[in-house]
Image (tube, rainbow, N blue to C red):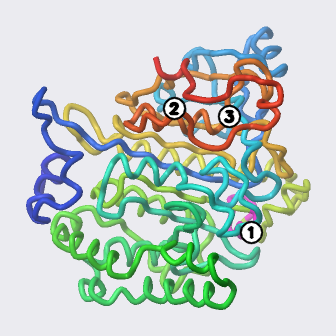
Amino acid sequence: MATNRREFLQTAAVGAGAMTLTPTHCLTAASGEQSFPRRFVFIRKSNGVRPNELALPTFSETEKQQDSKKQAMAVDLHHHQLPVWMESLESHKSDLCILQGLSCKMSENGHWSYSSVMGAYKSGRNSLSGIKRATIDFELANLSPSPFGHVELSLTGNYSSFRKGIVAGYSASGPHQRNYCYADPQTAYDELFKSVTNPGAVESDNAMLKFLQREEAFKAGSLRGYEKLKLSNHVGSIESIQRRNTKVAKMSGAIAQHLPKIDPIHTNGGQNATTPEKQEAMTEILISALVTGLTNVVTYTIDELSTPIKGLPGNEGDHISLHELGHNGGYSGISAEKIREKVRVGHMQQVAKIVQRLKEVPEGNGTMFDHTMVMYFPENGEGHHSHGTEAPFVIMAGNQCKLQLAGQYIRLPYHATEGHKTIGNWYTTLLNAHGNPIQHYGDLDLEMSRKKLDQSGAIQQLTG
């Protein structure tokens, strides 16, 4: 067994015959130093993250005033306690950034954002024709190649039961191109690790083929002319998927060392699994997909308004609707506020698990987490019925992160004021720092434009 991840990946690369994974793990000719892939995990949540929920309980009176008035500020987290629901991140506080003040008015707000929050554009109600560009996760995946390129996971449903199988996702690989995602842990396990668990499936790829057939049937039945033509390649062809699987199959010996453990309760979609059980299983898959090098970018919709919340600690007998919580509906005598907090506590536990596990995997002179960023954020803005004026991000950034983030509570100037920044600025910052010199990613904010306020480019105070 390889003693660290570099040896593991070198072993895998030899077996794969110089496959596409290898460029990001090679020695640079000029310096002789090893370069490692940059990894990004995007965790989307519903119902908003209200800015006051991120305020530090040990703020001074001056800091409380600045924060409540939404004035620009930067505070050292080491001098403060975290909010109760973030306590699982306490031991990782040196890697934590709470970033307040970003806006997302150029994306869809209200109940859902669909693809738009990841692409910084208005998309309409989940329409393919409204997808204007590749979402930020795909853009970053292009900068750090891997066999899968990008992996999308989601735990969503129809209020009473979870989706399962391979279904339409929220990310986009390009204009008018909707991604696919794995909707239950067992399907994600079977598809990502089939080179080890079911080698024969590498050739047939039946689940993906069925998905593609459904998508083509949808297009044929509902679209005409130009609309049909421009969507013809919105999902990768089955041939390209088979080529990818062939490459992955050559890594199977090394991948077998890092297979996630999935409880049998997740068989056949896992409809009897609780929501925390599903989240834990998806986290295990996410970690293994990163550690094995199958992907360097994962987008995980940990919940959205239709996600059934079953088996929540303290409310085990309740079938909780996130939408109802958004309208202050409580369950079993427990207020909506308390239940919303418990939901967030569960989310932070999964974030902490990702960080801790990646810190346990050696890479170079450090660990895998050194080159990783985990971002947890509201997919629809600051509230249940959001307006997009604020979109807080909880960011875990390894010590080789190319941005000045870690260990800080940062509040940027409020929306439509001098110095304000949008999610477009944040995504531009990520891209610029990791090899894409784009001047500005995403659409501009209309109110900022009307006021002739500068809103393009990266967030300079984060770039060091």
Q: Is residue 134 above or below residue 443?
A: below
Of the pair 177 and 307, the residue shown nearer to us? 177
* Farthest residue, direction top: 62
Labelled disc at residue 429: 2
Labelled disc at residue 58: none
Q: Is residue 213 above or below residue 164?
A: below
Residue type beneath disc 2:
Thr
For numbered disc 1, what is the local secondary structure? loop
Is residue 232 in view from this perspective?
A: yes
Q: Which residues are magenta?
A: 305-315
x and y percent of residue 63 in the render? 75, 13
Residue type beneath disc 1:
Ser
Q: CA distance from mark 3 to mark 2?
A: 11 Å
Assess whether mark 3 and mark 1 are in contact (beta carbons under 8 angstroms). no
> Which residue is under mark 1?
306
User: Which residue is drawn at the image coordinates 52% and 48% (left, top)?
Assistant: 136
For numbered disc 3, what is the local secondary structure? loop
Residue type beneath disc 3:
Thr
Of the pair 295 and 421, the residue shown nearer to us? 421
User: Which residue is drawn at the image coordinates 37% and 68% (left, top)?
Assistant: 261
Residue 403 within the magenta-colored segment of the rendering:
no
Rendering quarter of residue 412: top right
